[in-house]
Image (cartoon, rainbow, N blue to C red):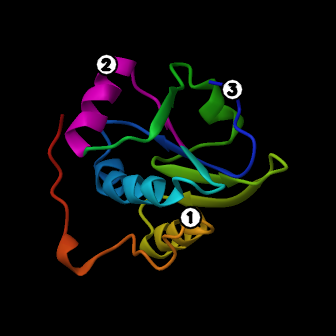
Amino acid sequence: MPVPAGPTLYAFFKTTCPTCVLTWPYLERVRALSVGGALRVIAVSQDDPAVTRAFNDRLGSHVDTVYDPRPWRASDAVGLTNVPTLFLVGDDGRIRDTVVGFQKKKLEELGRIAAEGTGQEGTPVFRPEDGVPEFKPG
């Protein structure tokens, strides 16, 4: 997959990470809010494609995914220490913001950025009916 032009949100994850499981439905909402806008959302899996497909299917995720197999060169290049870690990269290719772990306020902010210019402004990433997701290992 070529490097996208324009602002991009890269979300590094492992399918065995409970915090990634918690984050993914909200990342999917950020992705859905970005449709037709300037922000591109790309997941970066540290697992193999088959396991990652099962993870995305189970969680209903349609986030475009690329792979960073062992020895995790991309993860090392950005200094990754935890998953999930999200990097918001600007038009100029520089990291504008980093989100480590599950951060509701940051995910809401990313949702607002994603929705800019799409007609979906004001659509919440978090909804009262969401409750707390349950972790179910793959």
| Disc 2/disc 3 C-alpha distance (Å) | 21 Å
Quadrant placement of the C terminus:
top left
Please say if 97 is above or below 128.
above
Please say if 17 is above or below 34.
above
* Residue at the right extreme of this rendering: 92
Task: Tell me the amino acid under the disc marked 1.
Answer: Thr
Task: Tell me the amino acid under the disc marked 2.
Answer: Ala
Tell us which disc is closer to us: 2 or 1.
1
Q: Position of residue 6 (x, y in %)?
A: 74, 48
Q: Observer-nearest residue: 16 or 30?
A: 30
Task: Tell me the amino acid under the disc marked 3.
Answer: Pro
What residue range appears in magenta?
A: 42-59
Which residue is label 3 attached to?
Answer: 2
Side of 4 relative to 49 (left or right): right
Which residue does the image show at 39% across and 75% down from the upper left? Answer: 124
Which residue is label 1 attached to?
Answer: 118
Q: Earlier in the sequence, mark 2 or mark 3?
A: 3
Whether the magenta-drawn stretch holds residue 47 is answered as yes
Query: What is the crowding at mark 1: few (fewer than 14 residues within 10 Å), some, or many (at least 20)?
Result: few
Q: Earlier in the sequence, mark 2 or mark 1?
A: 2
Which residue does the image show at 51% across and 20% down from the upper left? Answer: 69
Which residue is label 2 attached to?
Answer: 50
Q: Quadrant of residue 36?
A: bottom right
Please say if 81 is above or below 121.
above
